């Protein structure tokens, strides 16, 4: 039986924390969330020696232990709460060697908590190259803890870190904030009331308590008492605490670190910034990068996506033959397999997008994009970091919503998640092409521009304006207790680390598969059931009808089979549902066939085309678009004799698909990323509600408007 | 009369032009200021405006060896004393 040491990995942002984490654990990682919040929690294991295993938790990058919001405080509960089940045996602290002054603030707080800490000085090579000379022994002595120089990217020094961990931690004997500065008398009482081990722990609990809500009543009473006796002002105390720490750190660094002139390094960085954040060229370059990402998501990802679909079709064919016909065969081939392929087909896009974002983040470019775009996005309740998800939404909302993880601001992140699905994604394209082809003539307008292309562009613009508009409304509706700010570090430019990028991509794909995948497969099985079963007796009636007809030749047999399929879909639960909702969608100009297609395309928008094809007696998706369009245009309402697809109906349907939340995968990802059914349902409700209202207005008002002119 | 004008050189961080330097004089104790202190923007440090986005919002400043982007309204909370002329 081997022993397990639990370790917390702590450090400032941009210190190579995840690079060290990846170097230690490789792909042996579990990704989840901290309890109750959507802050990513990665845990991993690695071997220390023959009989010891380390379990390491990567805490979010932070500049201090002072909480900025309720959510940010939660990961650090495991350092502060002595009764926490995951309280680490040891803290591994990673610092950027060229930026010690700021990095050590958080470290000294951990020291005052009397935590056993090991300090890993990362990017030691870079510091040396810049002319920063650190005396390791001196630093180790002044801080009272082991110090290990490290180059996490090149994996130099990793074995020293592991060796140091195996020696176990030592609780530093130094206190950075002397206890007499902490108002000992009152704090003593509070400390014992809270069961805290140190004064500083009691002090920090006070600050966290100021924003926390999961505080025990007895603790709360003790804290309230302390606050009222001592005129506790959280802000002032935090400021003074930090300034005092800086003063002491400066004194230590003055003896242990010699800094040469770093101007040459800075000038090189400035030159890159002069181009990438230029008021004109900066934007041109950014749009170039976006264009490149788009090309990859649209065209390059198309090949593996196609391959996935094809292999599933092949697999389905094989299983069709292998499993005896009947319910099981049908469930596997038409329920489970399409569900699985519907999940896997997203992987190429998710992988490409998360790869580009990981590269942009690792090089430091992402922060510059946020810097350039912040002012524009702010007006809509978003911030500079919302740009990438929003733009990615025009390919697919699923990877786009997953890309909102690096928006730290909770409100901006929530709004971005809520409005991203309004951007015209690629699944809307087949629906748009089908309907635009029916309503708009293929007529050249100017040079290479034609009318249909303009209409399509108009729909993309509509999606964008809808997203911006919805964001503006959410900005006013969603309340936020914390003052919103957008202070971010622009890290130094670096080459991306292949290992970090690769592990990020694998993690994203895995999370999608196992978290959102579950929901997607469940819904697709339900939808399959609805489309392939009907009320008792309904299907046997259809079967009996067709069994009575004896086809004369193969062509007739084929058309009979298609007709039977159409009839079956009509009498299935989905068909019944489509008919049942007809009174509700009639005012939008939709008939029951459209109703059925709306029901089945809740799985994904492009399913609309397949269902409509079946209903108009054509082979599923592979069939001829022109044939389908002409069949649809010919169809007439049996009651009134009028065309089903009038201009008003087509426009109403187009607007419906622009707004309606017809995508279970997006909902699954929204649920995963917000960890809240409330916001998932709000997304579904506001999008589909708006779709209904706008379609209603168009269908009802358009003929009246047409008469007026 | 504006008395503030008489405190020669004292201004807010958002009033500095690109390339100008100043010494951080005063910092408040709101959440924003604490975040700024954590990132190395403390009284006595030299702060230099390195670049700005269009309409000078946000701006990027260099302080304690870090490059920090902050909005104009956030820069307005920091009192500085301009260096040189």
Image (cartoon, coloured by chain):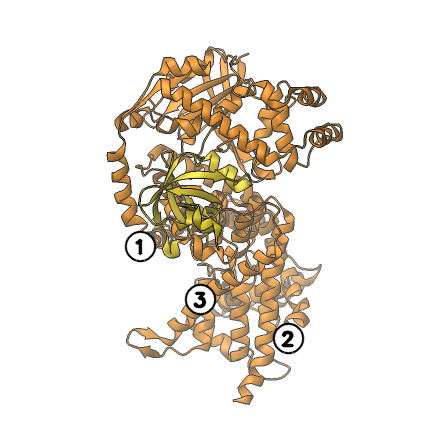
Circles 3 and 2, Cβ within 8 Å, touching? The answer is no
Q: Earlier in the sequence, mark 2 or mark 1?
A: 1
Q: Nearer the viewer, residue A522 or A112?
A: A112
Q: Earlier in the sequence, mark 1 or mark 3?
A: 1
Distance, label 3 to label 2, CA atoms, is: 26 Å
Examine the rendered structure and indicate whether residue A648 appears above or below residue A8.
below
Q: Nearer the viewer, residue A178 or A474?
A: A178
Which mark is on residue A556? none
Examine the rendered structure and indicate whether residue A441 appears above or below residue A119.
below
Which mark is on residue A461? 3
Say left or right for A134 vs A638: left
Q: Which residue is mark 1?
A: A288
Q: Nearer the viewer, residue A68 or A175?
A: A175
Q: Chain of mark 3?
A: A
Looking at the image, which residue is at 59% across and 45% down? A482
User: In the picture, which quadrant includes the N terminus of chain A?
Assistant: top right
Chain A representation colour: orange
| Chain given the colour yellow | B
Q: Chain of mark 1?
A: A
State the image coordinates of residue A444 (x, y, percent, origin top left).
Answer: 33, 78
Q: Residues within 10 Å of mark 3 (few under 14, many from 20)?
A: some
Q: Earlier in the sequence, mark 3 or mark 2?
A: 3
Q: Nearer the viewer, residue A443 or B48?
A: B48
Q: Residues within 10 Å of mark 2 (few under 14, many from 20)?
A: some
State the image coordinates of residue A386 (x, y, percent, origin top left).
Answer: 46, 51
Q: Which residue is mark 2?
A: A587
């Amino acid at each position: 039986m081997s022993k397990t040491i639990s370790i917390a990995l702590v450090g400032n942002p941009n210190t190579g924390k995840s690079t060290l984490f990846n170097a230690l654990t490789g792909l042996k990682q579990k990704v989840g969330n901290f309890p109750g919040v959507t802050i990513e929690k990665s845990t991993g294991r690695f071997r220390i020696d023959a009989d010891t295993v380390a379990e390491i938790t990567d805490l979010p990058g932070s500049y201090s232990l002072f909480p900025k919001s309720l959510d940010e405080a939660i990961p650090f509960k495991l350092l502060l709460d002595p009764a926490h089940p995951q309280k680490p045996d040891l803290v591994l602290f990673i610092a950027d060697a060229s930026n010690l002054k700021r990095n050590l603030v958080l470290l000294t707080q951990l020291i005052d908590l009397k935590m056993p800490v090991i300090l890993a000085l990362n990017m030691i090579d870079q510091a040396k190259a810049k002319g920063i000379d650190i005396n390791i022994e001196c630093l180790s002595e002044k801080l009272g803890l082991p110090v290990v120089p490290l180059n996490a990217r090149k994996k130099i020094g990793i074995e020293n870190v592991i060796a140091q961990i195996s020696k176990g931690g030592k609780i530093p004997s130094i206190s950075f904030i002397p206890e007499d500065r902490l108002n000992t008398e009152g704090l003593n009482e509070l400390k014992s009331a809270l069961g805290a081990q140190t004064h500083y722990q009691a002090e920090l609990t006070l600050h966290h308590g100021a924003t926390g809500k999961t505080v025990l009543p007895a603790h709360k009473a003790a804290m309230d008492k302390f606050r009222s006796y001592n005129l506790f002002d959280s802000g002032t105390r935090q400021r003074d605490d930090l300034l005092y720490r800086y003063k002491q750190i400066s004194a230590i660094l003055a003896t242990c670190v010699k800094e040469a002139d770093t101007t040459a390094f800075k000038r090189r960085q400035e030159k890159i910034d002069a181009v990438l954040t230029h008021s004109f060229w900066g934007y041109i370059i950014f749009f170039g990068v976006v264009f490149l990402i788009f090309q990859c998501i649209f065209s390059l990802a198309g090949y593996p996506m196609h391959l996935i679909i094809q292999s599933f079709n092949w697999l389905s064919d094989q299983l069709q033959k292998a499993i005896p016909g009947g319910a099981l065969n049908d469930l596997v081939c038409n329920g489970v397999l399409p569900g699985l392929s519907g999940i896997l087909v997203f992987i190429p896009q998710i992988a490409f997008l998360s790869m580009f974002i990981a590269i942009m983040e690792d090089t430091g470019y992402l922060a510059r994009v946020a810097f350039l775009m912040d002012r524009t996005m702010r007006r809509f309740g978003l911030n500079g970091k919302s740009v990438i998800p929003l733009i990615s939404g025009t390919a697919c909302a699923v990877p786009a919503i997953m890309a909102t993880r690096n928006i730290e601001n909770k409100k901006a992140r929530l709004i971005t998640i809520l409005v991203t699905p309004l951007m015209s994604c690629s699944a809307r394209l087949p629906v748009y092409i089908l309907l635009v082809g029916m309503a708009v003539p293929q007529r050249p307008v100017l040079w290479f521009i034609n009318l249909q292309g303009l209409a399509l562009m108009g729909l993309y613009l509509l999606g964008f304006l809808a997203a911006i508009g919805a964001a503006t409304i959410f900005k006013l509706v969603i309340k936020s207790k914390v003052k919103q700010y957008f202070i971010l570090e622009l890290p130094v430019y670096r080459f991306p680390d292949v290992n970090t990028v690769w592990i990020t991509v694998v993690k994203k794909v895995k999370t999608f598969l196992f978290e959102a995948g579950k929901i997607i497969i469940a819904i697709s099985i339900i939808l399959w059931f609805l489309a392939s079963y009907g009320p008792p007796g309904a299907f046997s009636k259809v079967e009996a009808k067709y069994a009575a007809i004896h086809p004369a030749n193969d062509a007739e047999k084929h058309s009979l089979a298609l007709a039977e399929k159409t009839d079956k879909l009509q009498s299935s639960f989905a068909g019944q549902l489509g008919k049942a909702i007809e009174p509700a969608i009639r005012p939008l100009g939709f008939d029951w066939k459209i109703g059925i297609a709306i029901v089945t395309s809740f799985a994904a928008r492009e399913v609309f085309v397949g269902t409509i094809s079946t209903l108009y007696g054509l082979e599923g998706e592979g069939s001829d678009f022109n044939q389908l369009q002409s069949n649809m245009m010919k169809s007439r309402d049996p009651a009134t004799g009028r065309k089903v697809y009038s201009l008003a109906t087509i426009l109403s349907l187009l607007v419906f698909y622009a707004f309606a939340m017809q995508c279970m995968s997006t909902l699954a990802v929204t649920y995963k990323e917000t960890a809240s059914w409330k916001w998932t349902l709000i997304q579904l409700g506001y999008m589909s509600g708006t779709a209904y209202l706008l379609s209603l207005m168009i269908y009802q008002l358009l003929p009246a408007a047409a008469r007026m002119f | 009369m504006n008395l503030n004008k008489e405190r020669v050189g004292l201004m807010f961080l958002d009033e500095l032009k690109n390339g100008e330097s100043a010494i951080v004089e005063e910092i408040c104790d709101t959440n924003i200021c604490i975040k700024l202190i954590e990132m190395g923007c403390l009284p006595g440090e030299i702060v230099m405006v390195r670049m700005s986005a269009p309409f000078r919002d946000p701006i990027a400043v260099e302080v304690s060896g870090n490059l920090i982007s902050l909005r104009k309204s956030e820069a307005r909370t920091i009192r500085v004393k301009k260096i040189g002329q």
